[in-house]
């Protein structure tokens, strides 16, 4: 949709479903919230619990009912900063001061331009843009969590125009730890969202965190 269409947007609310397709399939609903310039929140609603992960603009955090609240640090925090940049798509050189073109490469049957970017905090991501359409087809990165490092592939499919920009309605997450397919059912832009929604929950107990919602 270009810079002008993107800059008219200040927030995004996405709803849909997800399926974890590993040894035992799990499915649920998800909600994702983004607010300019750099706030994000995602809720994964499993049948028995809700897992949340957010970035307040400064603090990255996650909450799982069995473990309570955890604050992100290091490479995991650097990744959250990049993923939460609302205008990342039109400001790659700002997000990745080190951005290098690595030639063309096929992703499936699609010929892509391959770019490698490194953020100010050292987070690196490889992006594959379709030569014909210019749309992002895939990203590769090494993600860190308490369980260790994992190579993550994200595949973007089924682009649809919403408010002048194209959004992938299907995203496939593939890693050595798990595979998840997200399918969007609803996208709304410029919805009022209070900043408090992105803040780290107070306290470590699941009961306190649940009370906020």
Image (tube, rainbow, N blue to C red):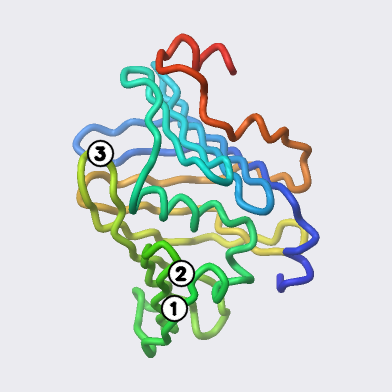
Q: Residues within 10 Å of mark 1 (few under 14, many from 20)?
A: some
Closer to the observer: label 2 or label 3?
3
Q: In whole angstroms, how far apart are the C-alphas of marks 2 and 3?
A: 28 Å
Q: Tell me what residue is drawn at x 41 percent, y 19 percent.
A: 49
Q: Residue 141 occupies which quadrant of the picture?
A: bottom left
Q: How many marks?
A: 3
* Residue 137 marker: 2
The mark nearer the N terminus, 1 or 3, is 1
The answer to whether residue 49 is left or right of residue 159 is left
The answer to whether residue 170 is left or right of residue 180 is right
Q: Residues within 10 Å of mark 2 (few under 14, many from 20)?
A: many
The mark nearer the N terminus, 2 or 1, is 1
The answer to whether residue 145 is left or right of residue 212 is left
Q: Tell me what residue is drawn at x 69 percent, y 51 percent.
A: 36
Closer to the observer: label 2 or label 1?
1
Q: Tell me what residue is drawn at x 34 percent, y 65 percent.
A: 140
Task: Say which residue label 1 marks.
Answer: 98
Task: Say which residue label 3 marks.
Answer: 146
Q: Residue 114 occupies which quadrant of the picture?
A: bottom left
Per the image, label 1 sits on a secondary structure element best described as: strand
Q: Residues within 10 Å of mark 3 (few under 14, many from 20)?
A: few
Q: Tell me what residue is drawn at x 48 percent, y 72 percent.
A: 96
Per the image, label 2 sits on a secondary structure element best described as: strand
Quarter in which the C terminus is drawn: top right
Q: Position of residue 207 (x, y in %)?
A: 46, 9
The mark nearer the N terminus, 2 or 3, is 2
Q: Nearer the viewer, residue 79 or 176?
A: 79
Q: Position of residue 40 (x, y in %)?
A: 57, 43
Q: Above or below — where is 196 with respect to 190?
A: above
* Residue 73 marker: none
């Amino acid at each position: 949709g270009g810079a002008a269409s993107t800059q008219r947007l200040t927030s995004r609310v996405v709803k849909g479903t997800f399926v974890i397709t590993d040894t035992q399939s799990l499915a649920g609903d998800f909600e994702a919230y983004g607010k300019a310039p750099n706030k994000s929140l995602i809720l994964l609603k499993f049948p028995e619990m809700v897992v949340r992960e957010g970035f307040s603009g400064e603090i990255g955090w996650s909450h799982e009912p069995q473990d309570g609240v955890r604050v992100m640090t290091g490479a995991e925090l650097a990744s959250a900063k990049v993923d939460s940049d609302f205008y990342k798509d039109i400001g790659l050189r700002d997000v990745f001061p080190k951005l290098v073109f690595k030639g063309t490469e096929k992703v499936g049957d699609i010929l892509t331009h391959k770019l490698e970017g490194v953020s100010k905090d050292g987070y690196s991501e490889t992006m594959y843009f379709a030569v014909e359409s210019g749309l992002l087809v895939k990203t590769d990165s090494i993600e860190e969590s308490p369980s260790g490092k994992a190579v993550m592939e994200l595949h973007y499919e089924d682009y649809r125009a919403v408010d002048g920009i194209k959004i992938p309605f299907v995203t496939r997450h593939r890693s050595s730890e798990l595979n998840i397919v997200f399918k969007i059912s609803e996208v709304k832009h410029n919805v009022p969202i209070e900043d408090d929604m992105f803040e780290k929950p107070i306290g470590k107990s699941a009961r306190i965190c649940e009370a906020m919602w």
